[in-house]
Amino acid sequence: MFDRSIKIAPSILSADFANFGQEIRAIEAQGADWVHVDVMDGHFVPNLTFGPPAVKAFRPHVKTFMDVHLMIAPVDPYIEAYAEAGADMITAHVEAGPHIHRTLQAIKAQGVKAGVVLNPGTPAEAVEDVLDLCDMVLIMTVNPGFGGQKFIHSGVEKTRKIRKMIGDRPIHIQIDGGITSETAPLVVAAGADVLVAGSAVFKGGSVDTPEVYGANIRAIREAAEAAQQAA
């Protein structure tokens, strides 16, 4: 059943890199709905993170839903490897190659859910003709590459436009970048239902004090749910 209830997807880019297994188990125990894995290649974005072996190593620890965001170019040659590593959803950028329709077909062919991603400078209309291939549209509200950046407010109107395009189709809208209990209500009121948060979830906590993660997740969720109910 498709469900537009608010889902919090902590980005493990903000976790303790020496302790991923425990960090994943801690955020799930504290209320995370999804686990968001940011894959960066040092080429499409200015940072380098997780290859397929790392994602495969995360998989046994993820009991919820593993959402793998590929910030890489080219993307098509790596889809099979990330699917085999255990991704439940693979998201690819419109900007990463000339054939986003083919890329989304390739993701679906692996038997996993497919998402399409828009950078802040890319208009909403860029995904209009591929929505029927998508399980999710991810709207970046920072320029991809690093955690801890400030929220870009133009993403709110873009969210509103995409929500209107989607209509009654079972497609999630995910927001990634600068999500806090202050910014979450803005995008949720515009139609988002999946919120990626890195530093806002992990700040102040650790695997020894996981209750801090829980408090951070609850603060974002409560603000977002209030906005969803009011919308």
Image: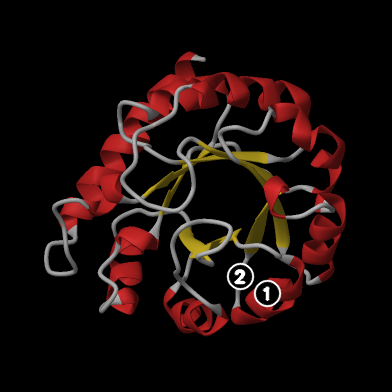
Nearer to us in this view, 91 or 172: 91
In the picture, measured across the screen, residue 117 lies left or right of residue 214, that is right
* Residue 204 in view, yes or no: yes
Q: Position of residue 210 (x, y in %)?
A: 19, 61
Image point (48%, 61%), residue name: 38
Provide the residue designation for mark 1: 83
Image point (60%, 26%), residue name: 159
Cα distance between the residues tagged 2 and 1: 5 Å
Location of residue 112 (image quadrant): bottom right
Nearer to us in this view, 196 or 193: 196
Q: Dot 1: what SS?
A: helix
* Residue 1 in view, yes or no: no
Amino acid type at circle 2 is Ala
Q: Position of residue 165 (x, y in %)?
A: 77, 25
Q: Which mark is residue 182?
A: none
Q: Is residue 206 above or below residue 186?
A: below
Label 2 with label 1: CB-CB less than 8 Å? yes
Provide the residue designation for mark 2: 87
Q: Position of residue 13 (x, y in %)?
A: 37, 61
Q: How many marks?
A: 2
Q: Is residue 132 above or below residue 35?
A: above
Image point (52%, 22%), residue name: 154
Amino acid type at circle 1 is Ala
Q: Position of residue 51 (x, y in %)?
A: 53, 77
Image point (34%, 78%), residue name: 21
Q: Dot 2: what SS?
A: loop
